[in-house]
């Protein structure tokens, strides 16, 4: 598909009123880099913070993040730093784009550097191991003075960097926060929809990684289209069932952060979790699969956490349980599939909306 020449949606007069905002993106991985570059293309002052001095120098020398987004030139106005104090000085909006394993530590470091009117946006798609808290909940706990939102959706970083047409969801209880993020990111190739179900949107982003691994396994085993269809739809059923039990709106999963993100993550080789699955399907061990991908795949840890939580709450999740048995208990993929196929048969659609009388 031909890429679109990027153009911010705001008119020049609007930009003059808003581009004095100072934006920080914390995390120099693929998605953090893509978000920072998008904001820079939209003519805002944005700083990309990363831990590695070597990575920063490499970007300065080549103009691209060769470790995570090789081949894509970044906007020349993008500021780079490894100094957190510098990145957060008088900042208006902060995007947290680091893995869930290091999320709390970074939030604690950032807390004393942020004012109460700073808006915080999580882009992470994982669950904290010890607490089963989602990233935005960690932000609320560690930086209580700030309003919090979540970005989630079918957002492969490489395609965003190519300026391919993409859409995402900004979820927050704050309409003002949603409007601000829409203003920062909207362009002729990137559309931002708002949602108030922050918990549901964020859960969708975390849970779909489990099923991307399952789908990758199916792909490696040359599964037919019928099989892939079953995996995708039953994955959505498990995600909705789990989220509803935890208090989210299951209908949220019919949107971009649910079925949209699930589809792209379960079908694209650009998805790290999908590639983990294809490696497992080829017969690699979990350790070999992780090493071959070379980047953090949140689905591995999420599978372990969700399997435990589903058992605690009595939630029926045969796909997640089967994947757990394959990855952590040594059950062969064939035996795992057999167990899932012979498990209790459930209803097709569990959540319905009653028509108005």
Image (cartoon, rainbow, N blue to C red):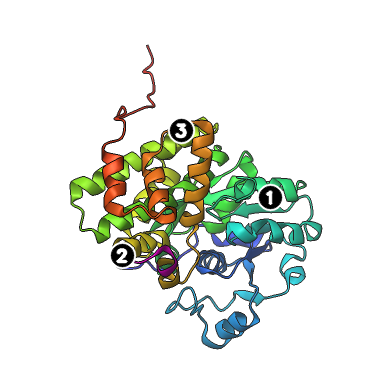
202 to the left or right of 326: right
Residue 268 is situated, as x and y percent measured from the top left of the image, at 33, 60
Instruction: Please state which of the two labelled residues, at mark 2 or mark 1, is closer to the viewer.
Output: 2
The local crowd at label 2, few if under 14, some if 14 to 19, many if 20 or more residues have their Cα within 10 Å, is some
Q: Which residue position is annotated with label 3?
A: 315
The structure residue drawn at horizontal position 37% and vertical position 46%, both measured from the top left corner, is 322
Residue 92 shows up from this direction: no
177 to the left or right of 31: right
> Helix, strand, or loop for circle 2?
loop
The structure residue drawn at horizontal position 64% and vertical position 49%, both measured from the top left corner, is 130
Q: Which residue position is annotated with label 1?
A: 139
Mark earlier in primary sequence (1, 3) = 1
Residue 223 is situated, as x and y percent measured from the top left of the image, at 21, 54
Mark earlier in primary sequence (2, 3) = 2
Q: Which residue position is annotated with label 2?
A: 283
281 to the left or right of 356: left
The local crowd at label 3, few if under 14, some if 14 to 19, many if 20 or more residues have their Cα within 10 Å, is some
Instruction: Please state which of the two labelled residues, at mark 1 or mark 3, is closer to the viewer.
Output: 3
**Above or below 60: residue 243:** above
38 to the left or right of 86: left
The number of numbered discs placed on residues in the rendered structure image is: 3
Q: Which residues are magenta?
A: 284-288
């Amino acid at each position: 598909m031909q890429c679109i020449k990027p153009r911010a949606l705001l008119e020049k007069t609007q930009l003059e009123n808003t581009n004095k905002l100072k934006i920080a993106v914390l995390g120099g991985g693929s998605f953090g880099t893509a978000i920072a570059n998008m904001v820079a293309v939209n003519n805002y002052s944005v700083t990309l913070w990363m831990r590695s001095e070597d990575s920063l120098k490499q970007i300065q020398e080549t103009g691209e993040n060769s470790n995570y987004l090789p081949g894509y030139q970044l906007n020349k106005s993008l500021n780079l730093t490894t100094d957190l104090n510098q990145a957060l000085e008088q900042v208006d909006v902060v995007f947290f784009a680091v893995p869930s394993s290091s999320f709390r530590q970074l939030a604690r470091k950032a807390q004393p550097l942020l004012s109460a009117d700073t808006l915080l946006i999580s882009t992470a798609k994982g669950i904290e191991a010890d607490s089963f808290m989602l990233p935005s909940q960690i932000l609320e706990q560690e930086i209580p003075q700030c309003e919090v939102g979540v970005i989630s959706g079918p957002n492969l970083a490489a395609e965003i960097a190519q300026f391919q047409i993409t859409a995402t969801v900004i979820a927050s209880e704050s309409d003002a926060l949603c409007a601000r993020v829409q203003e920062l990111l909207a362009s002729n190739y990137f559309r931002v929809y708002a949602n108030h179900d922050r918990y549901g949107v964020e859960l969708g982003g975390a849970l779909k990684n489990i099923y991307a691994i399952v789908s990758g396994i199916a792909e490696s085993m040359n599964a037919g289209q019928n099989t892939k269809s079953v995996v995708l739809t039953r994955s959505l059923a498990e995600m909705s069932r789990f989220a509803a039990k935890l208090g989210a709106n299951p209908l949220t999963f019919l949107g971009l952060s649910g079925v949209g993100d699930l589809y792209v993550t379960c079908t694209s080789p650009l998805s790290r979790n999908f590639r983990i699955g294809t490696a497992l399907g080829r017969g690699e061990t979990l350790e070999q699969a992780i090493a071959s991908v070379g980047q953090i795949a949140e689905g591995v840890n999420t599978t372990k956490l969700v399997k435990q939580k589903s058992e605690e709450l009595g939630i029926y999740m045969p796909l997640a349980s089967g994947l757990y048995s394959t990855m952590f208990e040594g059950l062969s993929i064939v035996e795992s599939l057999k167990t899932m196929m012979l498990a209790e048969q459930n209803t097709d659609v569990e959540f319905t909306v009653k028509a108005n009388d």
